Image (tube, rainbow, N blue to C red):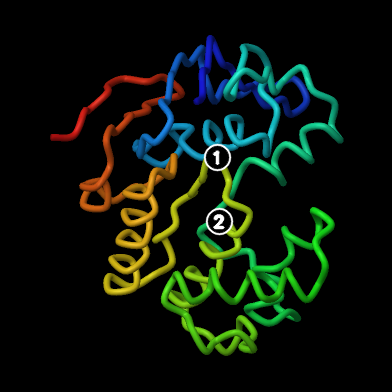
């Protein structure tokens, strides 16, 4: 599903270069639930952003399916993200002025779906993540855990091939965190490919594999039992 070869990312500030990713190689299979772990500053989120087309690497290659994503133009990458990838962020990234159902419907509307049909589908997905009846609530009327569930609903509403989650439990209490992780486990059971950055070892128990980063280098692969 994802093949990464010799991936590097360097940030330049004047004459100062910071090498964040240092020649990473990785393959992720279809239907796999992979966690990326490491200390703060190890390059976890940077690595996720390169694989998910939210940022561009300095060098190397990334292939998703049979598509060389680095060979695409910016408009092509935008449509690829919209059609084939889903995202969950630690700060939820919901539009505060929109209701829950409107937030979830946004990717469908961007794909050109009729508004009525998009809202109907959004409600079905909201139901599936345990948020039935919250369609008209705005983000400030939801708890952190509820906002993250709506974020998950928005990420999966267009049935993405790969779901990327960047510290999805970072801003949640333990109960809400467990709820979100259970939701990801259920998605994985139904065949969803998931790549998740986390700093909490206990939230990797449903993963097929844990990848450890240190100073921009993969140091270990831990295949879960």
Horizontal side of residue 190 vs 6, given as left or right: left
Residue 98: assigned label: none
Horizontal side of residue 63 vs 110, given as left or right: left
Q: Which quarter shows the C terminus?
A: top left
Q: Quadrant of residue 35?
A: top left
Mark 1–mark 2 contact, CB under 8 Å? no
- Secondary structure beneath dot 2 equals helix
Residue 156: assigned label: 2
In the rendered image, which residue does mark 1 sit on?
A: 161
Instruction: Give the crowd class for mark 2: few <14, some 14-19, many >=20 residues within 10 Å.
Output: many
Residue at position x 51%, y 24% in the image: 2
Q: Nearer the viewer, residue 77 or 60?
A: 77
Residue at position x 68%, y 82% in the image: 99
Q: Nearer the viewer, residue 87 or 39?
A: 87
Q: Nearer the viewer, residue 11 or 82?
A: 82
x and y percent of residue 176 in the render? 34, 73
Precedes in sequence: disc 1 or disc 2: 2
Residue at position x 70%, y 44% in the image: 83
Say above or below: 196 vs 76: below
Horizontal side of residue 142 vs 95, given as left or right: left
């Amino acid at each position: 599903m994802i093949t990464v070869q010799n991936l590097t990312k360097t940030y330049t500030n004047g004459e100062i270069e910071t090498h964040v990713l240092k020649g990473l190689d990785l393959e992720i299979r279809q239907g796999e639930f992979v966690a990326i772990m490491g200390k703060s500053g190890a390059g976890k989120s940077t690595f996720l952003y390169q694989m998910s087309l939210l940022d561009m690497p300095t060098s190397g290659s990334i292939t998703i399916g049979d598509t060389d994503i680095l060979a695409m133009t910016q408009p092509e990458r935008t449509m690829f993200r919209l059609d084939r990838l889903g995202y969950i962020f630690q700060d939820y990234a919901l539009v505060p002025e929109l209701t829950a159902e409107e937030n979830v419907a946004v990717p469908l509307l961007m794909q050109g779906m009729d508004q009525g049909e998009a809202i109907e589908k959004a409600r079905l997905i909201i139901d599936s993540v345990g948020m039935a009846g919250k369609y008209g609530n705005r983000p400030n009327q939801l708890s952190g855990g509820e906002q993250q569930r709506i974020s998950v609903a928005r990420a999966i509403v267009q049935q993405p091939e790969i779901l990327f989650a960047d510290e999805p439990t970072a801003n949640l209490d333990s109960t809400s965190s467990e709820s979100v992780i259970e939701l990801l486990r259920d998605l994985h059971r139904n065949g969803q490919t998931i790549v998740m950055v986390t700093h909490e070892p206990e939230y990797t128990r449903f993963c097929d594999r844990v990848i450890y980063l240190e100073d921009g280098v993969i140091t270990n692969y831990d295949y879960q039992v």
